[in-house]
Image (spheres, grey):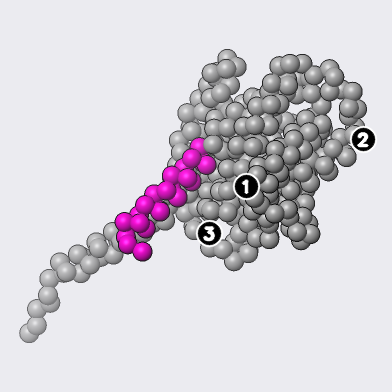
Amino acid sequence: MPAIFNAQARAQRNGAVAVALLLVYIVWGTTYFAIGIALQSMPPLLMNAIRFLCAGGVMLLIALWQGHALPTRVQWRNSALVGGLMVFLAMNFIGFAQKLGIGSGLMATVVTTMPMWLALWSRWGGERVPFTSWIGLALGVVGALLLALEGDFSATWLGALLAFGAPLAWSVGSYASRKLSLPAPAMASAAQWFAGGAMGLVVALWFEPLSALGQVTAKSWAAWVYLLVFGTLVALNAYLWLLQNTSAALAGSYSFVNPAVALLVGVALGGELLTGWVYAALPLIGAALAFILYGKQVQAWWVGRGASLRGKAVGATPPSRLG
């Protein structure tokens, strides 16, 4: 293939990655605000269950319209595993952890460990994770921790256990989606969300009566629609695409960018105030992204520069005098 076509293909792929990252960074950063509004009058388990059942139905129609076949038995099993881990366990672990007294600061900090777990599973699975990506992930966690210092770090032992289980379940599900046999992307999303939503609905009906949905306000329903359309159909599809087309570290980098976006949304829409920790945290998060995005190029430049300097030093050494 001529070089110009290779360059165009790379540019198109880089553009698609950039758009997907922006969607995940910005949209999922705003969902913190939307979830708070939805939960003002909506039961949390039912909120997630019907959200993913509806999203799965929409994606099924899209997949059938695109001509995709229904999943095979093996693909249904794999989709149920991914959906169970990501949609059912991870999201409901967070809800139960908050109900059991986990503080907002601790919850926000624990969630940022997700990409480090995902990178670890990828490394154990045989994928190479660059050293610079590990540095970037560590910087991101520190930056998110600084952002969370204004939050509440109280916890109960069971709440803390569930809080730590959420990013573990999400990371294992994310890794499984990279490795297991799944149907075409639209059909895979439909199957995963249907499975996870159905599991959530079964559990929700044990704790939350359906009649509670009749008391939900229009404002909470509007927030729920935003979560369905943008948080799930748009951003979650973008994240699933990133898992298949980028590194684990880059796909998971949303977890320490989202708190920064959520904070800025809170300042713009919720009247929140910035503190001194923010001005220390944001540069760290920016550095984390730089290491993940450009770490290999910077490392190669640094190694090359060192070799060049050593070569110049050897060439500049005066010859020894004999006799």
Quarter that holds the C terminus: bottom left
Taking the image as drawn, is residue 146 in sight?
no
Marks 1,3: beta carbons within 8 A:
no
Q: Which residue is mark 3?
A: 129
Check disc 2 and give the amino acid type.
Trp
Give the CA distance from mark 3 to mark 2. Answer: 42 Å
User: Which segment did they paint magenta?
Assistant: 1-22
Amino acid type, callout 3: Val
Q: Which image quarter: residue 283?
A: top left
Query: Which residue: 58% across, 48% down?
Result: 241
Q: Quadrant of residue 97?
A: top right
Q: Of the residues tagged 1 and 2, which is closer to the observer?
A: 1
Residue occupying the far bottom of the picture: 323
- Please tell me whether mark 1 or mark 3 is closer to you in this view: 1
Residue 38 in percent (x, y) is at 73, 23
Side of 62 relative to 146 (left or right): right
Residue 69 seen anywhere in this rendered image of the structure: yes
Secondary structure beneath label 2: helix
| 124 relative position to 293: left or right | right
* Numbered circle sitting on residue 206: 2
**Crowd rating for badge 3 (residues with CA inside 10 Å; few <14, some 14–19, many 20+):** some
**Percent coordinates x, y for residue 203 in the rendering:** 87, 39
Identify the amino acid type marked 1.
Gln
Residue 204: x and y, percent?
86, 35
Pointer 1: what residue?
66
State if disc 2 and disc 1 touch (CB < 8 Å).
no
* Image spot of residue 231 (x, y percent): 64, 34
Q: Is residue 282 magenta?
A: no
Circle 3 SS class:
loop
Q: CA distance from mark 1 to mark 2?
A: 37 Å
